[in-house]
Structure formats: C-alpha cells, structure tokens
Image: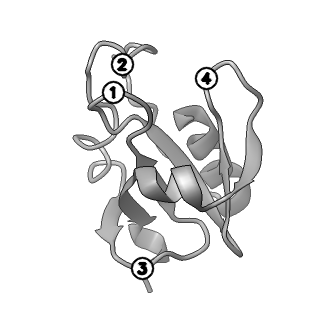
C-alpha cells in the first residue's frame, strides 16, 4: 500500500516521497512501524478533517500496528492496495472508517 501512495502522489500531484528504506515487507506481521515514525520526515502532518489526496492510516485485522494506508479520493472513496490483491477504489466506510487511526496531509496541500 505504501508504493501505491508514493505512486499516486508522484503521478497525480508531482510530489516525490522518498522510499522508506530498510523496512521489511512483512512489517505488520513482525510488529514493526512503517508509517507513524516516518510520516513527518516525509512532509506530512496530522489533520482532523478529510480532504481529497489525504492519506488515511489504518490498523486492520488482528495486528496492533498501524500498517495500512489509503489515499482519499473524495466523495467517500479511497484507493488502496491490500496484500495479495489488486489495487482498487473502495467506499470509505464500515471497516475502513472503523480502522482509521490517523489522517495525514502533505504539507504542500495545507493552504
């Protein structure tokens, strides 16, 4: 899901986000943090409202890790990538809204 967020920001907004080097692709399974300790250095700030292009961080399943990210497309739709599935658009509600732990906005979009 991180690669999808990076690609979206590059293709749609021209914003380059550095790859978070040195992380294991199974970071959720081993209880490692990919997002919470790195989003500020990547130029994101936590916000309370939800706007198009915001990143939604979620805690999904039985893990105790905030380990899933989606891009908010507006009109109650997200784009995300779930492991072993194709990336997709999905309604932002139910499970996804309940799993939300943080909403992030790139600092260049805060105006």
What's the residue at 46%, 31% (across, down)?
19
Query: Label 3 vs label 1: CA separation?
Result: 26 Å
Q: Earlier in the sequence, mark 3 or mark 1?
A: 3
Check contact, mark 3 vs mark 1: CB within 8 A: no
Which of label 3 and label 1 is nearer to you? 1
Which of label 4 and label 1 is nearer to you? 1
- Residue with the mark numbered 1: 63
Rendering quarter of residue 64: top left
Task: Residue 93: give x, y in percent of width and height.
Answer: 59, 62
- Residue with the mark numbered 3: 49
What's the residue at 38%, 13% (across, down)?
24
Query: Label 2 vs label 4: CA separation?
Result: 12 Å
Q: Earlier in the sequence, mark 3 or mark 4?
A: 3
Rendering quarter of residue 106: bottom left
Outermost bottom residue: 111
Task: Residue 35: give x, y in percent of width and height.
Answer: 33, 40
Q: Earlier in the sequence, mark 4 or mark 1?
A: 1
Check contact, mark 2 vs mark 1: CB within 8 A: no
Dot label at residue 83: 4
Would you place residue 27 above or below residue 11 in this image? above
Q: Indicate the secondary structure of the residue bearing disc 4.
A: loop
Rendering quarter of residue 29: top left
- Residue with the mark numbered 2: 27
Query: Label 3 vs label 4: CA separation?
Result: 27 Å
Query: Label 2 vs label 1: CA separation?
Result: 10 Å
> In the drawing, does residue 3 fall left or right of residue 58?
right
Q: Indicate the secondary structure of the residue bearing disc 3.
A: loop
Q: Earlier in the sequence, mark 2 or mark 1?
A: 2
């Amino acid at each position: 899901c991180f690669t999808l967020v990076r690609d979206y920001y590059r293709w749609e907004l021209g914003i380059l986000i550095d790859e978070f080097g040195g992380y294991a692709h199974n970071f959720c399974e081993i209880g490692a943090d990919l997002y919470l300790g790195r989003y500020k250095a990547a130029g994101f700030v936590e916000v309370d409202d939800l706007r198009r292009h915001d990143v939604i961080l979620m805690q999904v399943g039985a893990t105790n890790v905030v380990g899933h990210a989606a891009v908010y497309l507006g009109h109650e739709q997200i784009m995300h990538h779930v492991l072993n599935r194709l990336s997709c658009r999905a309604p932002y509600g139910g499970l996804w809204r309940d799993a939300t732990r943080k909403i992030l906005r790139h600092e260049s979009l805060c105006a």
